[in-house]
Amino acid sequence: MIKFHQILITKFSSYRSVFIPKEKLECKFSKSSGPGGQHVNKTNSKAEIRFNLQTADWLSEDQKKKFLRLYPNYVNKEGEIILTSQFTREQSKNLEDAIDKLREMIFECSKPDKTAFTIPPPSQYRIEQRIQCKRQRSDVKKTRNIK
């Protein structure tokens, strides 16, 4: 039997199933940094994606608030999310990598917050039962022969 809170754990089955409309993303390409010789100096392989979080109609308000709470370093003063990738030498792979990063972030934001689990105090009957067991065990130990 599946409990209701298990259904709410994630809206999506995996981060790959997160839908992001690509027409809402602003994509820019620039030169990558780091080693790579002449290839780095000639190609614009670094991918950067941007979108305004407040105008993202494919996200719920809860997801937006959680995104701001979990990933404040990715949001600029205008409220835009900026993600970059320069992992590979190919522009298309870097763009897919940046979109995958965004999918993972949205997937994490779709999970519900963990609530604090409090253990209720034991009832008076449980307390008395525990003390009685301790007394019985103590009596068993007292009756042992000591040489």
Image (tube, rainbow, N blue to C red):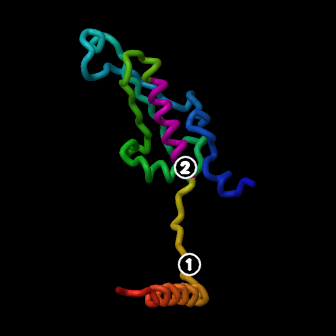
- Tell me where residue 11 appears, x and y as whole percent: 63, 46
The quarter holding residue 128 reads bottom right
Look at the numbered disc 1 and give the secondary structure of its residue.
loop
Amino acid beneath label 2: Gln
Q: Quadrant of the N terminus?
A: bottom right
Q: Residue at x 50, y 43 (%)?
A: 53
Residue 95: give x, y in percent of width and height: 46, 24
Q: Nearer the viewer, mark 2 or mark 1?
A: 1
Residue at label 1? 120
For this orientation, the residue located farthest to the right is 1
Question: x, y (%) of residue 36?
Answer: 27, 15
Work out whether residue 146 or residue 139 is closer to the camera in this orientation and state it: 146
Residue at which label 2 appears: 63
Locate residue 92 relative to residue 76 in the image: left or right: right
Q: Which residues are magenta?
A: 95-111
What kind of secondary structure does the magenta stretch mostly adopt?
helix
Q: Secondary structure at mark 2?
A: helix
At x 29%, y 14%, the residue is: 40
Disc 2 or 1, which lies upstream in sequence? 2
For this rendering, which residue is in front, 136 or 29? 136
Q: What is the tally of numbered marks visible in this picture? A: 2
Inter-mark Cα distance, 2 to 1: 32 Å
Q: Residue 85: within the magenta? A: no
With respect to residue 16, does 90 lie above or below? Answer: above
Q: Where in the figure is residue 62, as x and y percent of width and height? A: 56, 53
Residue at image location 27% in from the left, 23% down from the top: 33
Q: As shown in the figure, which amino acid type bears the numbered disc 1?
A: Pro
Neighbour class for label 2 at 10 Å: few (<14), some, many (≥20)? Answer: many
Query: Depth check: 121 or 38 in front?
Result: 121
Contact between labelled residues 1 and 2, with CB atoms less than 8 Å apart: no
